[in-house]
Image (tube, coloured by chain):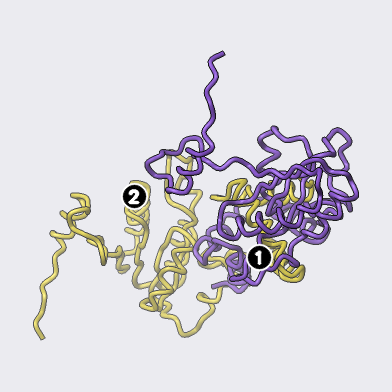
Chain colours: A purple, B yellow
Amino acid sequence: MSKLLEEAVAELSKLPGIGKRTALRLAMNMLRWDKNDVKELTTAIDNFRENIKYCARCNNLSDNDICHICSDSRRDRSVICVVESVGDVQSIENTRQYNGLYHVLGGVISPMQGISPSDLKIDLLVENIEKEGIKEVIIAIGTTVEGETTLFYITRRLAQFKNLKVTTIARGIGFGDEIEYADELTIAHALHNRREITNN
Amino acid sequence: MSKLLEEAVAELSKLPGIGKRTALRLAMNMLRWDKNDVKELTTAIDNFRENIKYCARCNNLSDNDICHICSDSRRDRSVICVVESVGDVQSIENTRQYNGLYHVLGGVISPMQGISPSDLKIDLLVENIEKEGIKEVIIAIGTTVEGETTLFYITRRLAQFKNLKVTTIARGIGFGDEIEYADELTIAHALHNRREITNN
């Protein structure tokens, strides 16, 4: 194979979920692009990797020292939504149902993967709550074993704030899901937390 | 979303088969890479797109004016294998069963997609056969309608060379395929071209 092609394929197949075959297909596809368009792609990647920062307040990805959410004066500065990763911020923003601040942990506690509480941005969260007089913390992390452990750990750390409301997002049957295929724990939880239907 | 991330995602999702979600996953993954490793990826892509050439003899991808196969003195210079695309050269090379030269058409005749014979490197093939005193041309293109049309067209163009042997790769049931799921045309062809099993 051409050395140039070989190197491009080798590099592209380092990306997650991209094997040799897909990498070859991507490289061959780029041959049909204008050279400037390929340059735009690689420049965007370089700029992103070189210049991206983490918000000093909430640990979200940011172009500046403080991210656009933390520096937005129209957001409700009394609520913090705690999430695992940057992608979760995007998912919640997409709903347009939340107007508070965020806090990105950067992972969940996982002894198996060697991630301990000190590897996550939990101290920064505690610091912010204290400094900013936060009224509510919504913990929005996945219901895996690691997620539940993290939820438990954070709840314990926040017990020191007597007037702070700590909530977690509702667990239950997702929209479009069949009860038949849901696991017992989810069904039990959904039953226990049933809601009265009001006719009005 | 961060402008830098947004731009990287927008560019990555221009690649075939990569949507916004996958692009976001790729970008987030690169954050965990060393900056130099990301630079190596983008440099490999840039080098490939900027410097790759098409072999002046066979139209294969090449780092130089003449590709490494055409300039390899150990190859059999009396046979040309005609293929649709650069990827096909790689597939045939991987078998290690062929030691001749190649000719990459750069597509197949497709009136639907506006690809006519003059868009393919057929004149160059005819020229090479004449100039190089080729003895056999193996046409190895897919059995689609477009492929068969191209096969027919090339065969007609090569009829002028009285001493040239023109062959095409065997059609039949692929290894690991069930007869039950093969189409009638393939089965009929495979039956017609049956081979005697020799006991020795």
User: What residue is shown at x 34% (from left), y 54% (from top)?
Assistant: B151
Mark 2: amino acid? Thr
**Which chain does the numbered disc 2 sit on?**
B
- Horizontal side of B96 relative to B33 (left or right) equals left
Residue drawn at x 68%, y 57% as measured from the top left:
B28
Q: Nearer the viewer, residue B191 or B62?
A: B191
Give SS at disc 1.
helix
Compared across the picture, whether B41 is left or right of B69 comes to right
Q: Which mark is residue B10?
A: none
Tell me the quarter of the picture where residue A195 sits. Answer: top right
Residues beneath discs 1 and 2 located on the same chain: yes
Residue designated by label 2? B144
Q: Quadrant of the N terminus of chain B?
A: top right
Residue B75 shown left or right of residue B156 in the figure? right
Q: Measuring from the top left, give residue B47's x and y in whole percent.
A: 70, 66
- Output the chain of dot 1: B
Q: Is residue B65 visible?
A: no
Where residue B67 sits: x, y (%)? 56, 72
Question: In this view, which residue lies farthest toward the front?
Answer: A162
* A194 or B27: nearer the viewer: A194
Above or below residue A75? Residue A45 is below
Label 2, residues with CA under 10 Å away: few <14, some 14-19, many ≥20: few
**Where is residue A26 drawn, in percent x and y?**
57, 57
C-alpha span from label 1 to label 2: 31 Å
What kind of residue is marked 1?
Phe
Relative to A2, residue B183 above or below? above
Residue bearing the label numbered 1? B48
Residue that protrudes farthest toward the left in the picture: B199
Most distant residue in the top direction: A200
B49 or A154: nearer the viewer: A154
